[in-house]
Amino acid sequence: MSTGTRFDGNGILQALQLNKAGDEDLLAFISSLIDQNSELERKLQELIPQKELADNIVEDAHKKGREILLSAETKAKFEAERIIAEARQKVEDIVKDKIQSAVNQGSVIIDKAQEQAESILEDARAQAESICGRANKKFKR
């Protein structure tokens, strides 16, 4: 019980003594209950600071839990951003490699086409020279 509504057992005990002075057992029982009530009230008063301490501990635990959660979320976001950046870099590197490979293959194709064109041109010149040589021989006869 709080001290503002404290049970005054002595006043009731005195009133009962005046009205029922002959019933010693009842008075002893009531006196025992009053003593027990006083003891329980004293224990309750001792528990109030412990309850307040427990409430503070629980509040601190909730606060630390929120801090840990916020820290974990921040770390997770940072890690996700790092992974995404790494993936983007790998994709860019792969794209660059593929482009370079395509350019190299294109250069090889162009070089081969140029070699074939030069070979065809040489064959055409050789045939033209052969034809011209034969035509000159025919006209010289």
Image: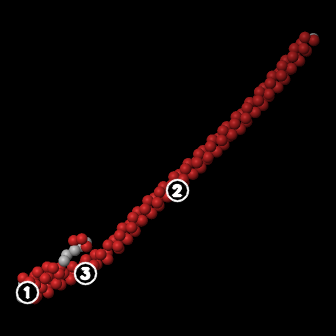
* Direction from residue 72 to residue 21 in the image, left or right: left
Residue 74, x across and y down, in percent: 51, 55
Q: Quadrant of the C terminus?
A: top right
Q: How busy is the neighbourhood of tag 3: few (under 14 within 10 Å), some, or many (20 plus)?
A: few
Residue type at the position of mark 1: Ala
Q: Quadrant of residue 117?
A: top right
The residue drawn where x is 31% and y is 75% is 47
Task: Tell me which label, 2 or 3, sits earlier in the chain.
Answer: 3
Q: Nearer the viewer, mark 2 or mark 3?
A: 3
> How many angstroms separate mark 2 from mark 1 (CA)?
78 Å
Pair 2/1: label in front: 1
Q: CA distance from mark 2 to mark 3?
A: 54 Å
Tell whether 25 sits left or right of 72. left
Label drawn at residue 75: 2
Q: Position of residue 79 (x, y in %)?
A: 54, 54
Residue type marked 2: Lys
Q: Is residue 113 above or below residue 55?
A: above
Element assignment for label 2: helix
The reply to whether residue 45 is visible in this rendering is yes
Residue 56, relative to residue 21: is it above or below?
above
The answer to whether residue 125 is left or right of residue 24 is right
Q: Residue 121 falls in which quadrant of the image? A: top right
Mark carried by residue 21:
1
Q: Which residue is mark 3?
A: 39
Please tell me which residue lies in front, 107 or 68. 68
Image quadrant containing the N terminus: bottom left
| Residue closer to the observer: 4 or 61 | 4
What is the distance, in whole Å, between disc 1 and disc 3 at their CAs? 26 Å
Q: Nearer the viewer, residue 47 or 57?
A: 47
Residue 89, relative to residue 15: is it above or below?
Answer: above
Residue 105 appearing in the image: no
Looking at the rendered structure, the secondary structure element under dot 1 is loop
